[in-house]
Each structure stands twice: as C-alpha cells, then as structure tokens.
Amino acid sequence: MTTSGLAVIGFAVAGWILARLIGSRSMFLLAYGGVIVVAVAYFLARRRLAVDASRSDLPTRVREGQFVEVELALEAKRRLSTIVLEEELAPELGLPVRVPIPLLPPGQTVNHVYTFTPSMRGVYTVGPLVATWSDPFGLTRKRMVLTEPVDIIVHPTTEVVDDRVLSREWEDPPIRPPVSKPWPTGFEFYGMRDYVSGDDPRRIVWRATARTLDPDSGTGRYLVREAEQGITDRVGIFLDTHADTHTPGHPSDTFELAVKVVGSLGTKHLKDGFAVTVDSNGGRIAAQLRGQRARIPLLDALARVQREPQPLGEGIARVLGDPRRDTHIVIVTPYLSRDAARKIRLLMDRGVSVLLALLQWDDSDPESMHRAGGLGCNIVEVSLGSPLGPVFRRVMGAASHR
C-alpha cells in the first residue's frame, strides 16, 4: 500500500464511523466506494510482469577504485507501461540505480549501462534487480525480483615494497644454526664462480664469460652467478586487529593502512617464492601460501578481515607457541603495549627475525615508538598517506645482530 492508498483506507473507515453515528446512507456509500477502489487497485497491481531481465557478468574480484561497468537488459513479452527498474548497491559501491520505463512494446528490449567504483575493500552485494509498478490510481505498489544478487570481492590496494628476509638476531651468513631450514639460495648477489657439472645453465653470466675468452685459442671460463646463502623460506605477517588501538570510525584509517601494508608485504614475498602465513589477534587468516597464484586467496582473506576485541599481546602469545624458529616475522600495528613488547622480545630471544611496522597518526602514543626502539629490531614508521616503497627501503640492512 502506498501513502495515498493508506489515506483512502483511513478516510473510508472514518467515513463509515461518521455514517454510523449520523445514520447517513450516502456516507455509507462513500465509505464503501473508497474500500472498493482500493480493492480494485490492489487487484490491478497484482499482475505479473511478462519480461526477461538479465545483468551482464560481473567480475568476481575487483580492486579498490576499479571502474566496473554493468549492463542491464529488459525484454518485454507483452506491453509494459510505467515501471521502474532498481538495482540495489551497497553504499561502498555507490548509489542505487533507478531506471524509469514509461512504455515498452512487446518484443522490444531496453538496455541501460551504469558504472560503480568500489571505495573500500570488502565483500559486497550487487542487486537484486527489481521492478516496481503501481496501479492506475497510485494506491498500491508491487515489487518483483528480476535477477538475483551477486557477490563481488573488493581487494585492498597494494604497493611495491622491499622487505629483505634477514638472518636471525645472533647469526651472520653463511653460518646458521642446525635447527634452521635454509632457502636454497638467497636473493642478494654474492659473486661469480666457475661453472661446474650440475649447475643450471641459466645462471651462466655470458657477458662475464665473454671477457675471459682467448681470441686465438677460443678457450675461456664459464662463470655462473652465485647468491648468498638463504636463511629461511617462511615469512609470517601479523596484522594487529585490536579495535581500540586503531583510529575510530568506519572505515578506520589506520586499520585500512595496516591491511594495505600486509597485502603489499604478502604479495612481495609470494612473488619471491616464500611460504607466507598471515595471522591476526583473533586467529590465523591465511596459512602456508606459496607461489604467485596464492596472491588471490591472500587478498580474498584480507578483503574479509575486520577489527577484533583481542589485544595484540594475545595474538603474539599464540605465535610464541610455534616450535619453529626459522621464520621472518613482520608485525604491523599502530600501538605497542608493554605486554606486546615483552612478548616480541621473547620472540627475538629465540632467534626469530622481527620487523616491526609501526603505523603513525596524529594521536599516536609516543611511548609505542620508545618501546619499539628498545627492542633493537628493524622498525618501519608508516604514516597515513605516505608511499610504502620509500619507507621500507629506508630500513633495509638496519637490523642489529647480537
């Protein structure tokens, strides 16, 4: 029922009561006439639309800020008049789309193209596509679902960052403890040596080899590239999801920045061939991802992550229970409490390589930086709006080895 229809019903009831009080036959007829008009309008509006509607295929996954185009098509099987198509959208995608159709002859198709741009990572619904029409008197309104809603995953944006997987606090390459599982080769150039049987021919440096050739005899040395010894093939990234330590509001600026940092680091290490695990205060987000194809499930998980009530210290305590110590751990947080700093120190005392990405904003606690400086690990200060690449490059090789 529309507002007009409810008003007619109200007047009909009031007229019937008034007719009963004064005994007026004409008032009774007027009241009954109003009820009959509403009933006829309701019956006329209950007709079903003979239409075929479709929505163009949407990408399952998009990025923040990506331009997405959608086409709606409606084909009439019989004459249609005065209907409105409405596509419902989540507020993070844009405003709902309304398309009025005054008249559509049978057999003809109307197409409408609209666009939306996701403003924030997450999982959102596009649709349903509904048709709305009314009776000739405008007293009732009918809605009919034409196409079902679909979900799309909006990935967080990422940037190119540098994060070198360092040795443990108390070791220097090429010496490593027996409990460490080494990555076969490191990522830093160490030097060149003579080719020996079994070496990968793709590692031959042909330009250097050409310099050793004797033009007269045609002999020379084949030189291969040698990288420094790897330390580990495991990277753990910890996302601080404590709701009380991030900036208030929805979205939280520092929390979205933290998700962006985690996504950028995870993408970087997956590209380099490491096994990446992502944890939050409340539990594990992604476990043992490896290879560039794992980038999609990583970003899917980060699209769904939300703030949690557990503090950072509880999550780090769970990491402390891992018996393996050959992991490079990156902790992304806007606030470092005494309890969290104490547990990070325990991680470092076990020989774990730790990088602390400390998010900075206007109301950041200065004590967090003081506690972080006392740990002696690598520290990255990430400010709101600052590019991540230069920030991470400034701390390369700055770890202190005991």
Image (spheres, helix red, strand yellow):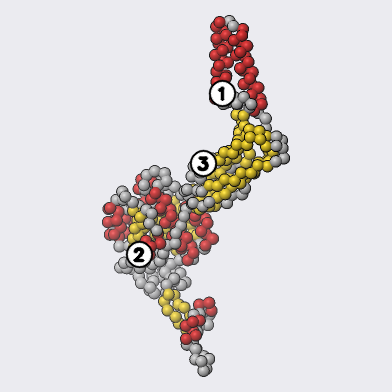
User: Alpha-carbon distance for marks 1 and 2?
Assistant: 68 Å
Q: How many marks?
A: 3
Which of the numbered marks, if any, corresponds to residue 350?
A: none
Q: Is residue 10 above or below residue 202?
A: above
Helix, strand or loop at label 3? It is: loop
Drawn side of residue 251 relative to residue 8, left or right = left
Between circles 1 and 2, the one closer to the viewer is: 1
Mark 2 crowdedness (10 Å alpha carbons): few <14, some 14-19, many ≥20: few
Residue 325 visible within the image: no
Rendered residue at 35%/60% (across/down) = 380
Quadrant of image for the C terminus: bottom left
The residue carrying mark 3 is 95
| Residue 385 visible in rendering | yes
Q: Residues within 10 Å of mark 3 (few under 14, many from 20)?
A: few
Circles 1 and 2: CB distance less than 8 Å? no
Is disc 3 in contact with disc 2, using a CB cutoff of under 8 Å?
no
Q: Residue furthest bottom?
A: 216
Left or right, 174 with respect to 77, comes to left
- Residue 340, above or below 145: below
Q: Which residue is mark 2?
A: 394
> First in sequence: mark 3 or mark 1?
1
The front one of 290 and 247 is: 247
Give 213 or 83, whichever is nearer the viewer: 83
Image point (54%, 60%), residue name? 293
Quadrant of the drawing holding the N terminus: top right
Q: Which residue is mark 1?
A: 4
Give the amino acid type for the residue marked by disc 2 in the picture. Answer: Arg
Q: Who is closer to the viewer here, 258 or 232?
A: 258
Residue projecting furthest to the top: 23
